[in-house]
């Protein structure tokens, strides 16, 4: 099968941890590699954000990345990319007119717009994965939401146009149905984890205090790092390591890093809060294995790959009971779920786990088993392959209905 992946801002080749680089980049890269291992021909289309990038790159994992000339060849915040999606779609249409893909898989709402427009003239079925929904972001961020005002309307239009939607969790299915999109065309395919890279056995970073809590993510306010710093006041002999954002030597220039450091200083916790900046992907497992608990406590989260990676490393998780985290973290089995934006409840859960070695060990074993059973990228690639097959059948049925109506 010839598969075209469209990921307009999240290149599978990008460094992770900065504002617009995170779980979507991992998802696109790992899924493309997994589908390639199944024998499919995968091409990822992502926007050129550097003039020195070659047009095409063949990666060791067996797929190709095409850098699409849409907008200036420089970093542009993803919320400012909508005006360039016309150029992106026209590039796709020209490429696909020469070599038609068997299926197009769009990641994020603007990719969906470009994919639907680009595929219109070639008749290829489009599968949409949103990764995040504008209605949810607006609900939680309010006036701080920087998304274009057209986002929600375009998301709904894309959902109606595509052959199939691949939602990442059950919570997203309900949100899509509330938007008026039909349940019959929605499949649930979660994100995955690399069980070779992330596993219980292996080196662990050295720590300086008896207990360590680790959290990993982009340095944006909704990730809940401030709540973890607040909770740390009730956790003696415990250090908090926050990984993510720009490289360590550029953290001083990052507004959110400065804000978090100032807050830690205000609470007298500067000696126990460490912001380490961007961590190279191969070094993430040893960081996670160094923790007694990995915390993932965003205000909202479409899916969240970090808890899966922690579980794969045999580390218990404390997570907000939001979005996809309620699917992946089984409360009282692989970790604990807590209300979002509730530092007191967060502190109680962390304190109870840090005081109970046996429970942490049991949660860690259960988490590793759960990942192996459900969340390896091999399994996710096979699930996605079945969605593509259903998308092709769906497109055929729609074409048949349209032909019948025209008679």
Image (cartoon, rainbow, N blue to C red):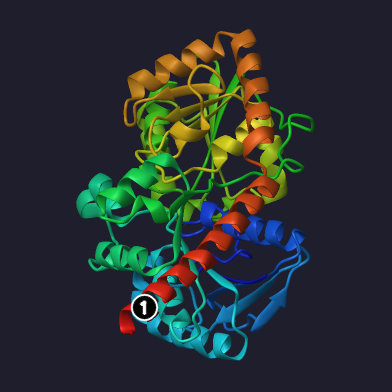
- Closer-to-camera residue (317/125): 125
- Closer-to-camera residue (77/313): 313
| Left or right of residue 390, residue 206 in this image | right
Asked if residue 406 shows in the view, the reply is: yes
Q: Residues within 10 Å of mark 1 (few under 14, many from 20)?
A: few
Seen as rendered, the residue at the extreme front is: 407
Measuring 52% from the left and 34% from the top, which residue is drawn there? 328
Q: Position of residue 292 (x, y in %)?
A: 61, 22
Measuring 69% from the left and 60% from the top, which residue is drawn there? 35
Q: Is residue 253 above or below residue 368?
A: below
Q: Position of residue 191 (x, y in %)?
A: 56, 47
| Left or right of residue 346, residue 374 in this image | right
| Left or right of residue 392, residue 113 in this image | left
Tell me the quarter of the image containing the N terminus: bottom right
Q: List the residue tagged with mark 1.
A: 404
Q: Position of residue 123 (x, y in %)?
A: 49, 80
Measuring 69% from the left and 34% from the top, which residue is drawn there? 372
Measuring 63% from the left and 29% from the top, which residue is drawn there? 370
Q: Is residue 288 above or below residue 101?
A: above
Tell me the quarter of the image containing the C terminus: bottom left
Asked if residue 136 shows in the view, the reply is: no
Q: Position of residue 9 (x, y in %)?
A: 48, 68
- Closer-to-camera residue (331/317): 331
Seen as rendered, the residue at the extreme left is: 143
> What element does badge 1 sit on?
helix
Name the quadrant containing residue 284: top right
Name the quadrant containing residue 360: top right
């Amino acid at each position: 099968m010839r598969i075209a992946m469209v990921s307009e801002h999240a290149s599978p080749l990008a460094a992770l941890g900065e504002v617009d680089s995170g779980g979507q980049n991992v998802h696109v890269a790992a899924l493309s590699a997994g589908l390639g291992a199944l024998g499919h021909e995968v091409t990822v289309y992502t926007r050129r954000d550097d003039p020195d990038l070659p047009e095409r790159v063949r990666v060791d994992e067996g797929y190709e990345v095409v850098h699409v000339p849409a907008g200036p060849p420089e970093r542009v915040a993803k919320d400012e990319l909508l005006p360039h999606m016309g150029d992106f779609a026209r590039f796709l249409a020209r490429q696909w007119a020469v070599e038609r893909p068997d299926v197009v898989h769009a990641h994020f709402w603007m990719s969906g717009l470009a994919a639907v427009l680009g595929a219109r003239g070639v008749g290829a079925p489009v599968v949409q994965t949103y990764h995040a929904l504008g209605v949810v972001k607006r609900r939680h961020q309010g006036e701080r939401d920087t998304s274009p005002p057209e986002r929600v309307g375009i998301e709904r239009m894309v959902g109606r146009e595509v052959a199939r939607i691949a939602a990442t969790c059950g919570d997203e299915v309900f949100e899509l149905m509330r938007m008026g999109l039909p349940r019959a065309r929605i499949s649930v395919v979660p994100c995955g984890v690399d069980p070779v890279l992330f596993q219980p056995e292996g080196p662990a970073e050295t720590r300086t205090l008896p207990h360590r809590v680790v959290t990993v993510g982009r340095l944006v306010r909704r990730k809940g790092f401030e709540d973890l710093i607040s909770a740390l006041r009730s956790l003696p002999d415990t250090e908090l390591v926050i990984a993510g954002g720009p490289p360590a030597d550029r953290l001083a220039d990052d507004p959110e890093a400065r804000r978090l450091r100032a807050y830690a200083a205000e609470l007298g916790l500067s000696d126990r809060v460490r912001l380490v900046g961007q961590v190279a992907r191969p070094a993430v497992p040893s960081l996670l294995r160094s923790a007694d608990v990995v915390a993932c406590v965003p205000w909202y989260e479409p899916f969240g790959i970090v808890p899966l990676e922690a579980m794969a490393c045999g580390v218990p998780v404390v997570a907000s009971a939001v979005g996809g985290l309620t699917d992946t973290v089984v409360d009282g089995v692989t970790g604990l779920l807590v209300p979002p934006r509730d530092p007191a409840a967060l502190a109680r859960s962390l304190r109870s786990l840090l005081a109970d070695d046996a429970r942490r060990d049991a949660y860690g074993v259960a988490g590793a088993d759960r990942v192996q059973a459900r969340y390896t990228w091999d399994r996710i690639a096979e699930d996605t392959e079945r969605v593509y097959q259903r998308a092709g059948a769906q497109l055929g049925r729609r074409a048949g209905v349209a032909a019948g109506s025209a008679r």
